[in-house]
Image (cartoon, grey):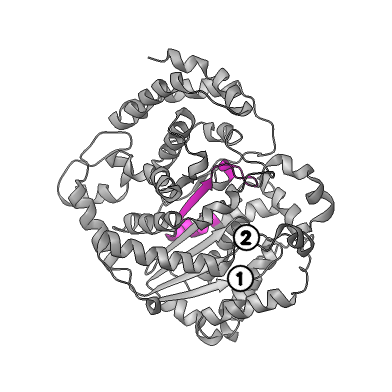
Amino acid sequence: RLRAIGQTVMDSAIDMAPGWARSMLQWQRVADTQGQQRNTEGSDGPEPTAEQLKDLMDDSARRLGKIAVIGVHGWFPRRMLQMLAGEPTGKSEKFCLMMRDALKAYLLESHGVSVADDDVSLFPLIGEGQIQDRVELLLAQIIGGNEELASSASESAPNAADPALKPSEPASGAERQAELAAEALMPPRQQRAAVLRSADTVFVVTHSQGTPVSAMLVERLLEAGILDATRQRVGLLAMAGIGHGPLAHLRDNVVIKYIESNTARELFELMDPSSFQSQRFVAALSTILHAGVRVVCVGSWVDEVVPLHSAIVQGVSHPHVFRAVYVDAAHYADDFLTGLIVFTLRLRNAGMYDHGLLVHLSGVVAGSLWGHWGHSTVYAEPAVYKLAVKWLLLSTATAPEPAHMSYRPFHAAEPLNPFYIPSIMRTLWDDPSIQACSSLRAELQRLVALFDKWAPETRAAKELRYRLEPVSCFQ
């Protein structure tokens, strides 16, 4: 039941979206080649039939070729806390194996394409520390056996180093065993760069702090010529990524302030768009998106660490970015709040601005450190990995022109004015682009009907309903 509901909510952004949003870039080129009217954003132009979309996806699936999967784990607590809370489960090996299994299952079920385990090369990269330290450490695991590449990569490393960077704790016996297990899954060290360079399709799968690390790692691999998105299909799956920092109130948590390392405290710098880490992350995202890398950002309902607006990288807009939310069965309800968040994600996926609505809604669906595990459940769901495969196949079915990333910086730590929420809803209701699309217009009308039936239980949701009372008067 959990998988079925999680699949339904995540797929809604594709399966429930209008045709022009579902394949915004790809169908424009198909329509042009067939002499049909070119689609424009927010119009009800010619939509691809189900058969045409299926043919595009089938052809795209058959062209996957040799596949490589890079796994990048997130931040791990200090060992003292691990002894109390348990060993982390979000490891790079898990991400690689989950992606391989999901890829094989999806291709066979949906497109009749069979992929053997030997057809997929795995790169579960392991290394803890602060963001910049991890980028160098993980890059060395790929190119460390090639002196020429290592020298070139060293020259392209950013000169602006954060003075706060410090080496991480020395590896324990258990960590060393984990490293040996990961090494056993990877190609021989001398061959790793060549295997990645010869791959036709590359998936990078990451979680939490691994998101900025992975963006910078892919940037460095592109600069070194190991990856080339003009001849390869490269996709980045970011699960509960910490793009705009953690939940603001965690900064004052006793564990974070007095027990945890600088690695944990560094993550709060991402809340400030003027910080070194935030600027490096945004620059890396801009580089890889312009190069042609496809990115899927999946947030998690009741995430106790990362707010939804951070997981979906709210400040970034680019047609290669696809956003979704994972809701487990225990917290799923087909109500106004769920529908509103899915609708907002659909707007972002269609290239429309949500006027910051998702930032206001993130606090309502945030979890707590006591009793919520949304930050971890997202990477245990196979449908999350399948969504990344779907987006890579769909978005690379044709070759759209390169596009530059747009960025709206905002200070995630600043308090929000809740009185903006009804004004934002009214703005979306009157938006000509939304009203011009019958599917989105119908979804807005459905949300108004759901609002009257919505009976929230949490305090935050009750306050949101009170502020949104004017919605019931929308006509």
Residue 11: x %, y % from top left: 38, 46
> Residue 194 at x, y = what percent?
47, 82
Give the amino acid type for the residue marked by disc 2 in the picture.
Gly
Amino acid type of the residue that numbered disc 1 sits on in the rendered structure: Ser
Q: Residue at 48%, 74% (x, y): give it.
A: 122
Q: Nearer the viewer, residue 366 or 283?
A: 366
| Quadrant of the rendering where the C terminus is positioned | top left
- Of label 2 and label 1, which has the lower sequence position? 2
Q: Which residues are magenta?
A: 285-310
Q: Residue at x 69, y 43 (%)?
A: 370
Instruction: Tell me if residue 372 can be seen.
Output: yes
- Looking at the image, which is closer to me, 446 or 396? 446
Q: Which residue is mark 2?
A: 74
**Residue 156: mark:** 1
Q: Which mark is residue 127?
A: none
Q: Is residue 149 left or right of residue 335?
A: right
**10 Å neighbourhood of mark 1: few (<14), some, or many (≥20)?**
few
Q: Is residue 301 left or right of residue 8?
A: right
Secondary structure at badge 1 equals: loop
The residue located at (58%, 85%) in the rendering is 145
Asked if residue 229 shows in the view, the reply is: no
